[in-house]
Image (spheres, rainbow, N blue to C red):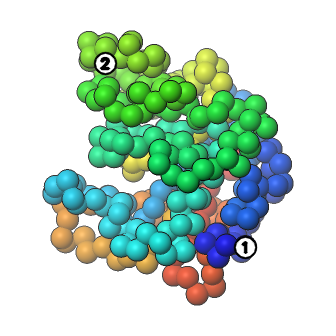
Amino acid sequence: MSRARIHWHLQNEPRFPFGRRSPDPEWYEPIGFPPPWPDRPWIFGVMVASANRVVAWRRSGPDDDPVLAILGGDDKRDERIADRRHMRHLRCFGDVAIGAQTLREQPGLIQTPQEPHEEPMEALYRFRRAHGLPAQPRHVVYSLRGCLDLTRPIFNTPGVEVIVVTTQAGALDLRSCGISTKGADLLVEPLERADALRRAHTRLFEDHGVRYLDCEGGQTVLRALHAAGLLDEVFLTETDVVVDDSRHAGVLKIFDFEQEGAQLIAEGRTSDDSPWRFRRWRFNPR
């Protein structure tokens, strides 16, 4: 049994629509979910934050990567391995989403259970097949203005279906850039309005069959979803790094969950003495 796995010492989600056996018991304990809503997907954020709640800042250059800084320098420590596998595990249950700015900052990102050049994750794909899901999660990209680089891997990886949720202005830009040649769907709504953002997710549910949506940020997207009442919960990895806010511009912090009235549904660690915490905060009871 690997030590680099999360042991959930608090687990208050007893519903297991995908079964009580995890995709790969050596690496994962099972994770339960409520059913989707009648008219929209169950939406969960997946984020990493420093010990003082920092999730991002304005980059000063190509080597200034907030996520890597928050995770710390040793990518072979047990917590880092567990966090990577936790993220891949959460991509198993449905489809995935990301904001345009996060995609610009991580241009090679593909939110699949096994990312390119990683070790095989066949158990995760068996799990998807067993539950009638497509081999790869559908990728939802939120973009107000368009301006997406269509040469990026997300638009050019066989088997990855992309749905861009955008505005009229964003759709005009994307069509002029040749989005139709990439086979991506455009879902157009005036996203600045909360009711339109809610309607967009009803359309994802009704027209595209999205039932569970794993949104990996950024924080700006999560705040918009939360303001519209759409962000049901957040899986948060809290590291032991303390970020000096004064050294960075445009610092963003994760929600103060207790102040926001969220309920702590689950909490785990890789070991009793680990300073990292893996937490699950729920906004919307179901």
Q: Nearer the viewer, residue 23 or 7?
A: 23
Q: Quick one: quadrant of the N terminus?
A: bottom right
At label 2, the amino acid type is Leu
Name the residue rendered at 36%, 60% in the picture: 67
**Mark 1 surroundings: few (<14), some (14-19) or many (≥20) residues within 10 A:** few
Q: Earlier in the sequence, mark 1 or mark 2?
A: 1
Is 133 displayed left or right of 80 in the figure?
Answer: right
Q: For residue 242, which quarter of the picture?
A: bottom left
Residue at image position (21%, 59%) is 63
Disc 1/disc 2 C-alpha distance (Å) = 48 Å
Asked which quadrant contains residue 127, the reply is top right
Question: Which x, y percent locates residue 96?
Answer: 54, 39
Judged from the image, the secondary structure of the residue bearing numbered disc 2 is helix
- Is 26 left, or right, of 181 in this rendering? right
Residue occupying the point 35% across, 17% down: 179
Q: Total number of numbered labels?
A: 2
| Disc assigned to residue 174 | 2
Relative to the observer, which residue lies in front, 131 or 75? 75
The location of residue 221, given as percent across then percent down, is: 41, 42
Say if residue 159 shows up in the picture. Answer: yes
Q: Position of residue 192 (x, y in %)?
A: 36, 30
Query: Residue 183 location, x and y as percent?
Result: 45, 16
> Which residue, as the protein is rendered here, is positioned at the far right?
20
Tag 1: amino acid: Met
Which residue occupies 71% across, 39% down? Answer: 128
Seen as rendered, the residue at the extreme bottom is: 273
Question: Which residue in the protein does label 1 denote?
Answer: 1
Asked if labels 2 and 1 touch by Cβ distance under 8 angstroms, the answer is no
Closer to us: 217 or 117: 117
